[in-house]
Image (spheres, grey):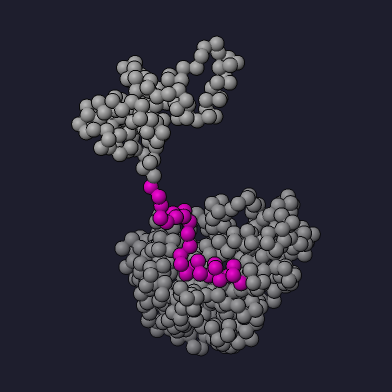
Amino acid sequence: MQKKYLGSVSNNSQKIKINDLLNHIPQGRKLTYLGKDFIEGISKYHEIFSTDDIDLNEILISEFPNIIYNKKLINDLKLFNKNLIDQITQDVIQIHSEQLSDNKLRDCLIDYYDLKLPETPTIEYKLQLNSECDTTLHDYQERIRRKVINLIYRNKKKFLIHMPTGAGKTRTAAEIIIDFIRLHSSFTLLNEKLKILWVAQSEELCIQAYETLKSIYNKKGTNNISFGHFYGHHNINPSILDDSAIIFTSIQKLLINYKTPIWEKIRNDNYLVVVDEAHRSIASQWIKALDYFVQNNAVNLIGLTATPGSGSKDESVKNYGLSKYYDNNKITLMDEYYSTIDKPIDYLVKRKFLAKIERNDIVSQTSISNGISDFQGGRFKFKKSTLKTLTKDPKRNASIINIIKEHVEKNEKILVFTCGLDHNKILKTILKYNDIVSEIIDQGTKNREAIISDFRDGNLNVLLNYGVLTTGFDAPKTNVCIIARPIDSIVMYSQMVGRILRGPYNGKGNSQNTLYTIKDNLNHGDYDDLFNSFNNFWR
């Protein structure tokens, strides 16, 4: 029977009654209720520190709430104090003691001697059936993480992760890096100065990656690690050589410095290179820098891209070169059976990870067919005179302004990709005539971060830009994208569209956004087709 913790014997009336109950039991039997070690311990203490004799009944009375569960005591009470036991059971439940089981008799004694459980609050312990992780990946991201780690464990060295813009490439890569750091000890136990490089095209992309990795590592890391910054005005602190570190570097700065002594030391401890916007990584200058680090067979290379091609699906040599550089290992969205999902954009839109895009064409009367200066491998080069003509076209500009006015009235955020610096100024001036505030971002903008922050926070509705915000720009609540310039590559077009792809379940984006494309643009097709444009080069 399970032992209960009963109320203590505290008043004299209780003690007298229990003493009467125990008096009839022989002394030798009483000793068995307390146990040999207990009696021996008390006896030895009294021999040294006390002149009084041991009062066995007093000890038994104080321990009575506990020894009442001793089967020997119940049997002895029935044997040596049968009359008193019968009297108690008759008084309490009007039944002769011989009719009661030992458990029933025990309960009767507990009631009679008022040894009931004291009223104490019940503490309930709720057992969780599922964990509640603070940070988790979406299922499609988790499958990519598992696939990459599985391949690394099997000693594969190069992979290209192909995910749509807005699907969480950086977030997924951050988890892979944390797993790699943990897995690294299985390959090189004694090297505690592991270096991981994150190579990106711009300062914005470096900062974006740093913020994501810092946030995740602070939650999941098992030991502190250093973060190195080598972009913009930031330089490597030599003290980083003594620590494990993740180093974020722009390709521009790395190209100038990768053969310097400090980078040679970093290379000696480098075991993983992650390349953002990896479709650019086969450019001749990029390859020189990357090969400096990954030519060591111990180094892993992971590329991240939304477009696993160099710019056009017809540039076969470059696209096959990209595939070869990553050992033809392209990892993209997979279902629960780890089979490639044929239409990943549609899949993510239906599950609200990406926004549904309402596509519209702006009809332009301007022909650009005579303005192409070169056509090579499916990639166009436009004459400067063509872009100037489009920049100054009044009807074309009126169409753009009217669309902006329509969506500003709905208090929506609008991102415009213009034909150039002058086009930015022209549109901003016309918008000002219409009492609409807009801001410009281009390569020369000094307060770029403040403008983007105002746009992201809802203090600015219209953002005009040229040559900047195709990557490294994150404003999930952008409602409208206007591509008001001719686009010469699938990569660039898909990056622009990607600015409005983030859905409600991935970065708190919108369920639906609107895309306007100037009709004089090349028709790059459905976004799922864009995503799959380069698949033939990865088989």
Query: Would residue 168 be found to the left or right of residue 290 on screen?
Result: left
- Name which quarter of the figure residue 358 lies in: bottom left
Task: Give the image location of residue 34, x and y in percent.
Answer: 47, 28
Location of residue 212 with respect to 405 vertically, above or below: above
Location of residue 111 with respect to 519 vertically, above or below: above
Give the residue furthest to the front: 79
- The magenta region covers 126-151
* Viewer-proximal residue among 162 and 79: 79
* Viewer-proximal residue among 54 and 190: 54
Confirm whether residue 464 shows in the render.
Answer: no
* Viewer-proximal residue among 50 and 188: 50
Task: Give the image location of residue 538, x and y in percent.
Answer: 58, 83
Confirm whether residue 200 shows in the render.
Answer: yes
Location of residue 65 with respect to 11 vertically, above or below: below
- Name which quarter of the figure residue 232 lies in: bottom right
Identified at 53% across, 70% down, the residue is 144
Query: Would residue 422 be found to the left or right of residue 460 on screen?
Result: right
Give the residue furthest to the left: 94
Looking at the rendered image, the quarter that the C terminus falls into is bottom right
Location of residue 436 with respect to 516 vertically, above or below: above
Task: Give the image location of residue 165, x and y in percent.
Answer: 49, 70
